[in-house]
Amino acid sequence: MSWKPVAPAALLALAACGAAPAPSPTPTPSVAATQDGTFAACRTRADGDPAASQSCADAELARIARTLPGHAEAATRHAAALRALGDDAIARGTFGQGAAAQVAVADAAVRLSQRRAAWLAGGDAPTGRGDPARLGADARAAWSASRATSCAAWPVTDCAARYDALLGAYQPAAEPTPMPEPVTTATGLPLPDCAQVKAAGLVGGALGDAFYRRYPTSLADPKGVDHVALDAAAIDNVVGYLACVATLTDGDPTVADNAAALFASPRHGAAAFAALTARAHADTPEGKGAARFLQQMKAMVE
């Protein structure tokens, strides 16, 4: 899917012909931002409709371009950079997928262009950080060309060093670190089911000691549990064992302390809570014990 802002395309055509945008007032920070409220009102009326939101963005981008007349090459490069940044954001899923992502990309183009225009017209320099290295090759090249031509056209202080901060509109937060792929299989699985635990006849401290020896250390390690491959059946087995021992030991904190890594795990935590919640719904003594253990784990992790 390609993001193609209408207004920048029109500006590219104008620049290619050597024509400047329609006459506008002398560029000042206030002129560059004057109609931001108009854009906001337009977006409110659009109410999330992708086509209407895009039309709002197109109109605002055209207005912003008219506040910085007389630099056709810079306008051309900026429009090309917006297109490349939009395509890159869609391809990478920076703002999610589908129509909502298209709307977010259009909004990002407006935010970047508003900040750029106000700054180049003499306003405050952009703050924050932007990292071209996080862009794909095409977007990075287009951005570099836009930065070079804009900084040549407008004599703002430390332009090249500060220009990348504008990328914050497309980089709202550091990209999440990819979740590590499972590289190990937990030893000691499957764990005993509750009937087997009860059949062993251990109670109190003896059961707690047996649990400590039996529970896989890889599942109790906050830094290692995400590397362990666990399917739904394995998680249900582990959660059932934890709930059983917690119930039979009257909530021994040793059980909860060792279970915390699994329930807090970015990879497995949601599935672990889902499995425990399902057990807690059972109208049985085991279900009531699982419900108590569920509350204990929520208090520790959430």
Image (tube, helix red, strand yellow):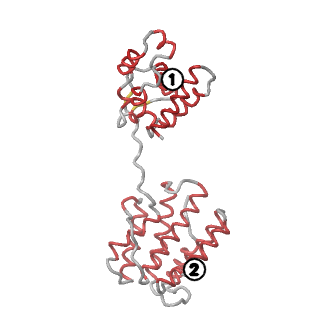
- Classify residue 278 as left or right of residue 205: right
Q: Residue 301 in the image: x percent, y percent?
A: 45, 38
Disc ID at residue 35: 2
Which is nearer the N-term, disc 2 or disc 1?
A: 2
Q: Residue 62 in the image: x percent, y percent?
A: 56, 78
Compare residues 189 and 222 and report the one nearer the observer: 222
Q: Residue at x 48, y 54 (%)?
A: 92
Task: Say which amino acid is labelled 1.
Answer: Gly
Q: Residue 125 in the image: x percent, y percent?
A: 39, 76
As drawn, 133 above or below 236 = below
SS assignment at label 1: helix
- Which residue in the protein does label 1 denote? 240
Disc ID at residue 134: none
- Classify residue 167 as left or right of residue 276: left
SS assignment at label 2: loop
Q: Crowdedness of circle 2 by 10 Å Cα count: few (<14), some, many (20+)?
A: some
Q: Residue 184 in the image: x percent, y percent?
A: 37, 29
Q: Quadrant of residue 191?
A: top left
Q: Quadrant of residue 217?
A: top left
Q: Residue at x 42, y 12 (%)?
A: 202
Task: Say which amino acid is labelled 2.
Answer: Gln
